[in-house]
């Protein structure tokens, strides 16, 4: 056999390689090996492959909320992962797989998904369906969630506020109110409350608020205290709307203040709660617009505190971490601003997206998909990490962790070697704003009795019309003998070839979907 014929045969074999082999090779290339992470002063404590049909489904959204990652595919599957271990807490099909799903919205206890023209609200701790309603009109983005409402933005500029009325068991409430509980009893009571959340099924007509332009960005709920609930959303006509519902009346949803810019707003607003050590302090809302300005607006009075011109359009949110605001431009470049005054602290070129920050470092992505490491005090570049194989890079303003994902469902976490416990940014402010206890570290949670993460979970919202009979679309591809790529997560007879944490990433263990 001539050399040319051999080369031709090799080319044919490469073309007919099984989808499982090609998928496994792609997954392997997306993982940042532990030695490589160590070389950059990082560790990769875990990685996991979420269970999905990689031949048809693609991962679309990854959202972090109070220690839980929620990963959503374009087939309506939502996975809840422990953000510190990567263990699957629960997994559910929320809605119809053949309908588009918007970015999940998260509140204290609830997770809301707009799928097609329906709103689904589930218990974020175990994935149980609590409420479902047909949305009147065409949704423009994902819902925002407060303690008692889900806000759905519509393409025509209307925002609908759906009432979510919690139900309580009087006997349980009476039993816990009669005595002083020990710490163990408090924990058991809270676990029981989370496990048995219920919402009233009585239909209450939603409140509505009209805005000028199309509402194509997910709203943001800021305050939920002091007798009012405040929600913020932008439109494509350049308006940033700040609306409220009076919690004493609960019959009027109206715009309280409105900021007008010279171009549309494509980025979701961000929020810095008031300083609990300052009396009568107000929270601050930050917005980034296509006209190149970062705006800081007082939540209480609606006054403009400052605005900063980057000189270029912005489509990414202005991210607030501690007392700094990070703003990236569409053409590349990141500004670090003082959150109180809006003055520039430093600027770094070529950056497209903020990723995370620790005490001494800032992590951002450039146009080539690399992770650039910067000094937090000067913005000077320290290092670069290749991560182009993980195109989904989550903006994390909550902790110092870096979360990366591929469209085929490989999710991994990175953090600095010495930071075994995550840094919670602005924890004191968020605790005061919530008016309740928030965890000071990521807490282990256990799945509900009878809930088995992974394959075989019933869909929420009806049967999957695209699932062929006799086959599970979420089952991983069969592995043949001699497969050089053992299951991800290692453990047992299949140790992690790249040094990842052991244990089945899809089974057992801990709890929900933040």
Image: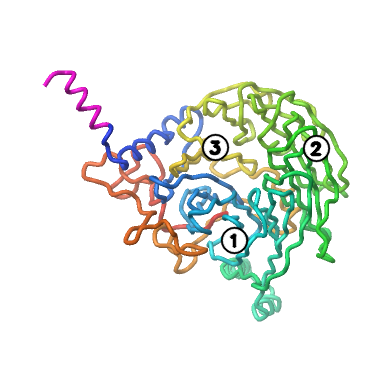
- Name the spot of residue 134 as percent of width and height, x first: 63, 63
Residue designated by label 1: 120
Tell me the distance, in whole angstroms, between the alpha carbons under discs 3 and 1: 26 Å
Tell me the distance, in whole angstroms, between the alpha carbons under discs 2 and 1: 33 Å
Give the farthest residue toward the left: 1
Q: Earlier in the sequence, mark 3 or mark 2?
A: 2
Residue designated by label 2: 296
Q: Secondary structure at mark 2?
A: strand
Q: Residues within 10 Å of mark 1 (few under 14, many from 20)?
A: many
Measured along the vertical axis of the image, is residue 236 above or below residue 476?
A: above
Q: Secondary structure at mark 3?
A: strand
Q: Quadrant of the C terminus?
A: bottom right
Left or right, 254 with respect to 353, comes to right
Quadrant housing residue 297: top right
Residue situated in front as seen by the camera: 231 or 139? 139
- Name the spot of residue 174 as percent of width and height, x first: 69, 79
Quadrant housing residue 247: bottom right
Tell me the distance, in whole angstroms, between the alpha carbons under discs 3 and 2: 26 Å
Measured along the vertical axis of the image, is residue 344 above or below residue 419?
A: above
- Name the spot of residue 488 as percent of width and height, x first: 37, 45
Question: Which segment is the magenta one?
Answer: 1-14
- Which numbered marker is on residue 393? 3
Residue displayed at 81% across by 65% down: 250
């Amino acid at each position: 056999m001539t050399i040319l014929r051999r080369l031709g045969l090799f080319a044919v074999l490469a073309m007919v390689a099984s989808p499982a082999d090609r998928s496994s090779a792609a997954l392997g290339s997306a993982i940042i090996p532990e030695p490589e992470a160590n070389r950059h002063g990082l560790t990769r404590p875990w990685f996991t492959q979420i269970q999905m049909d990689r031949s048809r489904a693609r991962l679309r959204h990854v959202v972090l909320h109070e220690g839980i990652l929620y990963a959503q595919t374009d087939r309506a599957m939502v996975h809840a992962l422990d953000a510190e271990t990567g263990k699957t807490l629960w997994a559910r099909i929320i809605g119809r797989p053949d309908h588009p799903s918007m970015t999940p919205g998260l509140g204290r206890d609830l997770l809301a998904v707009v799928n097609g023209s329906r709103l689904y609200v589930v218990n974020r701790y175990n994935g149980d369906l609590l409420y479902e309603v047909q949305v009147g009109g065409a949704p423009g983005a994902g819902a925002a969630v407060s303690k008692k409402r889900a806000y759905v933005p519509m393409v025509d500029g209307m925002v609908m506020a759906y009432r979510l009325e919690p139900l309580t068991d009087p006997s349980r409430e009476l039993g816990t109110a009669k005595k002083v509980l020990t710490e163990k009893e408090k924990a058991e009571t809270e676990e029981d409350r989370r496990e048995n959340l219920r919402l009233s099924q009585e239909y209450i007509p939603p409140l509505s608020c009209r805005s000028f332009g199309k509402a194509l960005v997910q709203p943001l709920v800021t305050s939920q205290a002091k007798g009012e609930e405040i929600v913020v959303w932008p439109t494509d006509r350049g308006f940033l709307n700040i609306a409220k519902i009076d919690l004493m009346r609960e019959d009027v949803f109206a715009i309280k203040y409105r900021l007008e810019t010279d171009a549309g707003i494509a980025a979701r607003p961000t929020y810095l709660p008031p300083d609990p050590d300052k009396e009568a302090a107000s929270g601050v809302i930050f917005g980034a617009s296509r006209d190149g300005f970062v705006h800081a607006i007082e939540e209480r009075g609606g006054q403009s505190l400052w605005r900063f011109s980057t000189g270029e359009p912005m489509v990414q949110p202005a991210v607030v971490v501690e007392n700094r605001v990070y703003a990236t431009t569409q053409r590349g470049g990141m500004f670090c601003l003082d959150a109180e005054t809006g003055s520039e602290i430093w600027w770094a070129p070529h950056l497209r997206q903020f990723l995370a920050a620790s005490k001494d470092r800032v992590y951002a992505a450039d146009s080539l998909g690399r992770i650039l490491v910067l000094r937090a005090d000067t913005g000077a570049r320290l290092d670069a990490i290749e991560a182009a194989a993980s195109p989904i890079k989550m903006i994390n303003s909550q902790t110092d962790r870096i979360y990366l994902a591929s469209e085929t469902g490989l999710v991994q976490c990175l953090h600095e070697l010495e930071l075994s416990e995550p840094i919670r940014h602005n924890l004191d402010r968020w605790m005061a704003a919530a008016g309740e206890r928030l965890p000071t570290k990521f807490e282990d949670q256990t799945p509900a009795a009878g809930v088995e993460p992974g394959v075989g979970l019933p869909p929420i919202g009806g049967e999957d019309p695209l699932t062929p009979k006799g086959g599970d679309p979420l089952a991983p591809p069969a592995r043949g003998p001699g497969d050089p790529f053992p299951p991800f997560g290692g453990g047992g007879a299949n140790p992690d070839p790249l040094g990842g944490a052991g244990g089945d990433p899809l089974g057992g263990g801990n709890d929900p979907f933040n």
